[in-house]
Image (cartoon, helix red, strand yellow):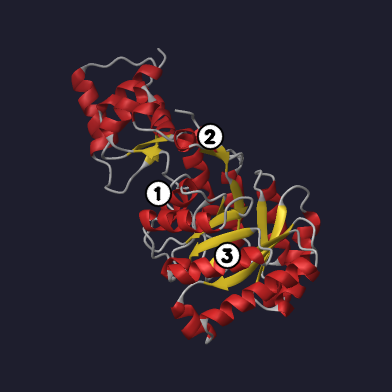
Amino acid sequence: MTRKEPRRIEIFDTTLRDGEQAPANAMSSQDKLDLALRIEALGVDIIEAGFPASSSNDFDATQAVSAALSRARVATLSRARRDDVETAVQAAGGRNHVLQIMGTGSDIHLEHKLGITRQQAIEDAVDAARFAASLGVETVAVGIEDATRGDLGYLQQLTERAVEAGARYIPVADTSGCASPAEFGDLIARIRSWAPAPVRIGVHCHNDFGVATANAIAGLEAGADDVQVTVGGIGERAGNTAMEEVCAFLAYKGERIGLYSTADLAGIYSVYNRLREIIRLEEPRNKAIFGKYAFGTAAGIHQAGMLRNPATYEYVEPARFGRERSLLISRHSGRAVLRHLLGELGLEIDKAELDEVYRRYIFERAESDCEDISVLRERLAADLAPVPG
C-alpha cells in the first residue's frame, strides 16, 4: 500500500472579520492592523481584514492591512453584488487578494433573509464572481453560507456554476453550527467531488454544539485545503473554530491523518493575550491551550504521577505553545507533593511530622484556596528550615 504524501493545510484567519462580529469584540483600524501583523508573524496564509462595503472602519482597516502585509494574502468579504465587489477591490486591490463572495446555501436564508429564488442566488453569485475576475482579483472565492442546511442538488449546481464563472476557492460554512463531524465531513467530500483541484475548498465552522474544531478536522480529512479560524475561537454566538486548537491537533495528530500546518505554535499565546487586551476579554479558566489552568493540575494522584513524569497526565505540552505547566496546591493535593518539596529543600521528617505538615498546609485549606507549588515551596522553606544555632 502506497502512503500518500502529507498535505499542508493553509490557515485562513478571520479574527478581524468574523471574530469581531460578536458583542463587545469591536476593534479600531489600528487594533486590526496591530493584530494582523502579529497574526502574519505566526505564518498564517490568509488574513481576512474585513467586509469593506459594510462600514468606513472596515474599509480603512482593510486598506491598512492589505498595504502592510508582506507575506500573507489579504481576504475580504463581499455580498453577491457588483458594488460590494468593487468596494472590496478599492480597499484591497487585486494582487494577493482573496475576495470572498457570499453565496447562499439554504432555502431558509434564501426565503427569509434575501427573499430570492435559488436560481437568482446562483446568477447573482456567478455575476459577482465574473465581475471580480474582470477587476483582476487574484483569487475569486464563492463561499457557501449555511451549506449544512442546504439541498444537495442545489449546492452542487451553485458550486459547479461558481467554478465555471472563475471561482478558484469555495469556502463551505456551517453557519448555524448545526452539523456533526460525520455530516460535515460527508458534505465536504461531496463538494470536493464537484470542485476538483486546482479549485481549493475551505471549511468555516461555528461552535454552537462545541464541535467546531472536530467538524473542521473532519472537513480537512475529507479533502478540504484550508481552515478558517479565529484566535481563541472568538466570534458570533458560541464562536468559531479556534486557531490554536486546530494547529495543536495538526501538530500532534497530523502525521496520523496525513495533514500538517506550518503555523508557529509558540507565538499564538502572545497574540491571544494581545487580542484579550484589545477587546477586554476575561481570561478563561479551562479553555484548551489558552485557559488559565489548561496546563495546571490540582489532584493529588495526578500530581504524584506528574512529579515523576509530566507525560502521565500531560499529552499536550505547554512549552510548545509558550506556556508553562503548573502544579496547583489545593485541598485535593496529597502527601506526595509535600515529600517532593521537602526533598528539594533537603528537609527530612518522619511520618507523624509529615501528617502534621499535610494538615497545616493542605487539609485545612479553604475549599477555593489554590496556589502554585512554588508559593508553597517558599512557605515551607520559611516555616520549616532549621534555625541556625
In the picture of the structure, the residue carrying the numbered disc 1 is 286
Q: Amino acid at mark 2?
A: Arg
Q: Amino acid at mark 3?
A: Glu
Query: Which label sits in the foreground, 2 or 3?
Result: 3
Residue contact between numbered discs 2 and 1, judged by CB atoms under 8 Å: no
Residue contact between numbered discs 3 and 1, judged by CB atoms under 8 Å: no
In this rendering, the answer to whether 344 lies above or below 13 is above
User: Along the polypeptide, which appears first: circle 2 or circle 1?
Assistant: 1
In the picture of the structure, the residue carrying the numbered disc 3 is 160
In the picture of the structure, the residue carrying the numbered disc 2 is 320
Q: Position of residue 325 (x, y in %)?
A: 45, 34
Q: Position of residue 52 (x, y in %)?
A: 71, 72
SS for callout 1: loop
Quadrant hosting residue 124: bottom right
Q: Nearer the viewer, residue 76 or 57?
A: 76
Query: Which label sits in the foreground, 3 or 1?
Result: 3
Label 3, label 1: how far apart the Cα atoms are:
43 Å
Q: Amino acid at mark 1?
A: Asn
Residue contact between numbered discs 2 and 3, judged by CB atoms under 8 Å: no
Check disc 2: other Cα within 10 Å, few if <14, some if 14-19, many if 20+. some
In the image as oriented, which residue stretches furthest toward the left? 352
For the point 45% across and 47% down, the residue is 292
User: Along the polypeptide, which appears first: circle 3 or circle 1?
Assistant: 3
In this rendering, the answer to whether 11 lies above or below 93 is above
Q: Nearer the viewer, residue 120 or 281?
A: 120
